[in-house]
């Protein structure tokens, strides 16, 4: 059951809301727990077993670590690593086993060795990539003494399986969400209307923008051999915007659903296309994944004993800039390799992660060379033109990355990047051929208008405007006119129903 | 007097929803097609153009219904007025909607439900689809939302003109041939229970027919890719327990004389040759089991004869 379907929006969510507010405060978490399980069962059929298994492993390990307290550090560490191994072992088995098997078999085939690993028919448990990271963060935080282990299994289970975030995140932290989901929230009209507004905005992004862009994107990516030049560039550009509209739209629906119950989910996107550097982009795009990798991989690795020794070694033997760069780059490698791997079991995803690793580490390495160039050219670093240049540069890098991400394989992605420069002509915009790419004229107008509205809303938010607050302060007729326009935009202009292929949320497959 | 906030919120919410309902209804009037040529796939909405209460038999179902019965033959051979309101991928909820629409302007004596529609989707997807169908029935603005692209000035002012009747009365004439060989009706012991959502709408179809005193016939058109013995058993069990006749041509292929080397266009749907054979057999069955009137030569039915002659000019001589 997808968040943008009628079944979720018109049946599941209203019934859960009604039940939630009908029963006493202290039992309300039970409604969320039961509905989360129902959501999981409806979405994934038979596999909540593995979610329960991961929850049990982490819950028990955290309690044991708590019992050990400050004593027996080695035992605690072993317990932590053992449970992390089990947790990530499940993820590896379901998500990466076949990828691993295929590559090992390929290697053995090349080496003419007889052995062969099996290719299993596996069904990926829904949300495993998300809840595994959530569970790991809880376990590591408990081991670090950030907060004590939770004795209440129901509360911990709800943190793991809370239905608005189980499918696509955001990847929650226990100290931010654990108590929130458990404690009963009193009915609030503002929460209900605020939540519904967010859901409407998410649906607009998903159905009007993302699913309409998908028609063009699919046409090019599904038969990429037939396209080059402007078509490939436009498809890569539209895919970038599609993914943003869809993923951030899903986050809005998730956050809106949670807000209806008085629960605040973490922000996962902050106008990423206004970023002036790749680093900044990843602080604004899929924030919960970036911060997870930063807190548990980058810091975890950087502060480990072997890395401290590596830093000491570098400081002794390398020039100052390189000595600083080298250990950071080693830790960054693991972060970006992890980022790529997390997205999927395919070389293209690994390459996607390493693409950013390469650009970031090269940028840091060459920074002393380029740092002063704008000054020498008399360009102000904070001037509008330079900022614009930085934004376009960052956006271009992101678009190329997205092309590699969307392409069927790494090889295809690389070929498509090169095909942009073959036969590039803007005449396709005027000779009508652009209208034969899955989107007709009306589709392109709606898509453009949707993108402008999304960009304007993002820009205003970036400038600190609280749009929802400002709309709420308008006189009732104006406010309602805006809401009706929103509802009608989704219902009339949405790319759904006859003539449109239903598009699943892309990140639900990760 | 100052109202309690809860009362204020309730009044406000109800007002908001009432206005939304009115706006959606108004939008539906504007967006709904002004003629009945494109109310669905195939010639779905052509029955609206028939004079009121002139239809003896209505066929509902998915593409197998539209392509599997050459309905003009029933007029030519027996003088039965029959229309097929089928749709691509129609599931039971959509067939139920088609029946409701037919009953809004016709009083057929017999409704034929092509049973492949009962296996169009299952599980959560079927439930989702049925909810969509329900919403579309309530709000035509949702069903025809994509017509915003084609809106002209007359969409805002002109009344509807649903007078179009396709010459073949809902039959989709196809002549391609893809030979099939195999035994798709072999009993493998597998079961194909009806999905709960499909079963729910099948029961609603049964109830609706009873309410309107219309006889219901379950019919399975030969379809190697679409049908199986497991499905036959499931539908037979339903028909048996509800006292409904079930005519499965897949299980009684010899009655039709279907030759899989010539009679299917894609191994799922029948082509004209196959549809004609099935219709000849179906006509015989209807004449033996139902008392349907022969309207040939009756006044008010001249258009049926004209359409039949046009059909004959289109299809090959036998």
Image: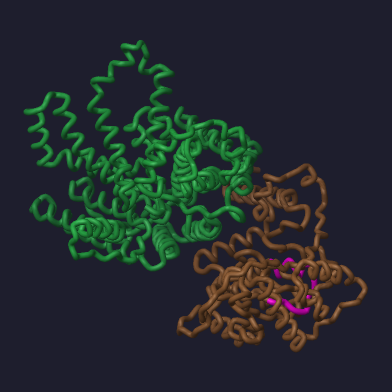
Residue depicted at 77% across the width and 66% down the height: B314
* Quadrant of res A120: bottom left
Query: In the depicted view, which residue is nearer to us: B97 or A196?
Result: B97
- Residue lying furthest right in this view? B299
Residue depicted at 93% across the width and 73% down the height: B299
- Chain (brown): B
Name the quarter where the C terminus of chain B is drawn. Answer: bottom right
In the image, A110: left or right of B118?
left
* Quadrant of res B100: bottom right
Residue B126 image offset from top left, x and y in percent: 54, 66
- Residue lying furthest front in this view? B317
Q: Colour of chain A?
A: green
Colouring rule applied to residues: by chain
In the image, B161: left or right of A215?
right
Residue depicted at 31% across the width and 57% down the height: A95
Residue A355 image offset from top left, x and y in percent: 31, 38
Residue A352 image offset from top left, x and y in percent: 33, 42
> Taking the image as drawn, is residue A87 in sight?
no
Whether residue B99 appears in magenta in the rendering, the answer is yes
Range shown magenta: B98-112
* Quadrant of res B312: bottom right
Whether residue A108 appears in magenta in the rendering, the answer is no
Query: In the depicted view, which residue is nearer to us: A251 or A349?
Result: A349
Query: In the depicted view, which residue is nearer to us: A388 or B200?
Result: A388
In the image, B153: left or right of A413?
right
> Taking the image as drawn, is residue B295 in sight?
yes
Residue depicted at 61% across the width and 54% down the height: A499
Name the quarter where the N terminus of chain B is drawn. Answer: top right
Residue A492 vertical position relative to residue A82 in the rendered view, above or below: above
Residue A127 image offset from top left, x and y in percent: 36, 56
């Amino acid at each position: 059951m997808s968040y943008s379907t009628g079944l979720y929006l018109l049946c599941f969510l209203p019934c859960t809301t009604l039940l939630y507010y009908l029963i006493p405060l202290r039992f309300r978490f039970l409604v969320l727990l039961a509905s989360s399980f129902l959501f999981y069962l409806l979405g994934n059929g038979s596999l909540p077993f593995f979610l329960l298994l991961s929850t049990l492993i982490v819950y028990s390990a955290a309690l044991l670590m708590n019992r050990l307290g400050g004593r027996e550090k080695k035992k605690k560490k072993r317990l932590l690593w053992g449970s992390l191994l089990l947790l990530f072992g499940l993820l590896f088995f379901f998500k990466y086993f076949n990828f691993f098997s295929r590559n090992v078999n390929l290697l053995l085939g090349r080496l003419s060795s007889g052995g062969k690993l099996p290719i299993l028919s596996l069904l990926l448990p829904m949300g495993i990539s998300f809840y595994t990271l959530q569970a790991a963060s809880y376990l590591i935080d408990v081991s670090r003494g950030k907060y004590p282990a939770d004795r209440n299994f129901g509360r911990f289970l709800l943190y793991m399986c809370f239905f608005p975030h189980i499918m696509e995140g955001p990847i929650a932290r226990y100290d931010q969400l654990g108590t929130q989901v458990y404690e009963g929230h009193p009915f609030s009209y503002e929460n209900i209307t605020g939540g519904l507004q967010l859901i409407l905005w998410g649906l607009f992004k998903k159905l009007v923008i993302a699913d309409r862009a998908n028609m063009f994107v699919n046409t090019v990516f599904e038969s990429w051999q037939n396209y080059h030049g402007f078509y490939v560039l436009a498809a890569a550009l539209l895919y970038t915007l599609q993914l943003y509209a869809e993923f951030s739209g899903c986050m809005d629906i998730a956050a809106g659903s949670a807000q209806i119950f008085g629960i605040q989910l973490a922000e996962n996107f902050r106008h990423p296309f206004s970023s002036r550097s790749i680093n900044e982009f990843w602080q604004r795009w899929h924030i919960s994944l970036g911060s997870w990798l930063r807190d548990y991989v980058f810091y975890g690795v950087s502060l480990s004993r072997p890395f401290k020794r590596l830093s000491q070694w570098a400081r002794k033997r390398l020039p100052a800039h390189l000595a600083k760069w080298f250990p950071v780059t080693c830790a960054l490698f693991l972060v970006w390799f992890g980022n790529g791997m997390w997205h999927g079991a395919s070389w293209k995803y690994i390459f996607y992660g390493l693409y950013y690793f390469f650009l970031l580490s090269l940028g840091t390495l060459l920074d002393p060379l380029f740092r002063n160039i704008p000054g020498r050219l008399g360009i102000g670093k904070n001037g509008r033109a330079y900022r614009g240049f930085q934004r376009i540069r960052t956006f271009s890098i992101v678009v190329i990355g997205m092309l590699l991400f969307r392409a069927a394989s790494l090889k295809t992605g690389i070929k498509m990047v090169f095909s942009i420069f073959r036969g590039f002509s803007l005449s396709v915009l005027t000779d009508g051929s652009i209208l034969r790419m899955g989107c007709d004229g009306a589709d392109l107008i709606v898509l453009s208008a949707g993108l402008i509205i999304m960009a304007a809303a993002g820009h205003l938010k970036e400038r600190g405007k609280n749009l929802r607050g400002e709309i709420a302060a308008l006189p009732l007729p104006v406010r309602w006119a805006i809401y009706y326009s929103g509802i009608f935009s989704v219902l009339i202009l949405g790319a759904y129903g006859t003539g449109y292929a239903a598009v699943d949320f892309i990140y639900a497959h990760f | 007097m100052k109202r309690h906030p809860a009362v204020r919120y309730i009044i406000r919410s109800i007002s908001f929803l009432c206005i939304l309902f009115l706006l959606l209804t108004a939008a539906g009037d504007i967006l709904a097609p002004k003629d009945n040529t494109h109310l669905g796939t195939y010639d779905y909405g052509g029955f609206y153009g028939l004079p009121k209460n002139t239809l003896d038999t209505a066929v509902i179902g998915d593409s197998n219904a539209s392509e599997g019965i050459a309905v003009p033959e029933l007029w030519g051979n027996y003088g039965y007025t029959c229309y097929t309101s089928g749709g691509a991928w129609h599931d039971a909820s959509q067939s139920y909607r088609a029946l409701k629409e037919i009953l809004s302007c016709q009083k057929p004596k017999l409704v034929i439900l092509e049973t492949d529609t009962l296996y169009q989707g299952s599980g959560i997807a079927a439930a989702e689809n049925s909810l969509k169908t329900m919403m579309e029935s309530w709000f035509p603005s949702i069903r025809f939302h994509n017509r915003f692209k084609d809106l002209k000035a007359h969409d805002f002012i002109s009344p509807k003109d649903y007078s179009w009747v396709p010459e073949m009365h809902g039959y989709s004439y196809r002549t391609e041939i893809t030979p099939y060989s195999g035994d798709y009706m072999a009993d493998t012991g597998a079961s194909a229970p009806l999905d709960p959502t499909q079963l729910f709408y099948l029961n609603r179809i049964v109830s609706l027919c009873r309410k309107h005193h219309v006889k219901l016939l379950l019919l399975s058109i030969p379809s190697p890719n679409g049908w199986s013995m497991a499905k036959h058993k499931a539908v037979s069990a339903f028909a048996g327990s509800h006292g409904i006749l079930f005519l499965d041509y897949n299980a009684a292929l010899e009655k039709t004389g279907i030759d899989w080397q010539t009679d299917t266009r894609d191994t799922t749907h029948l082509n004209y040759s196959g549809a004609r054979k099935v219709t000849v057999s179906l006509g015989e069955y209807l004449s033996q089991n139902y008392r349907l009137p022969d309207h040939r030569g009756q006044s008010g039915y001249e258009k049926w004869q004209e359409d039949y002659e046009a059909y004959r000019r289109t299809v090959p001589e036998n």
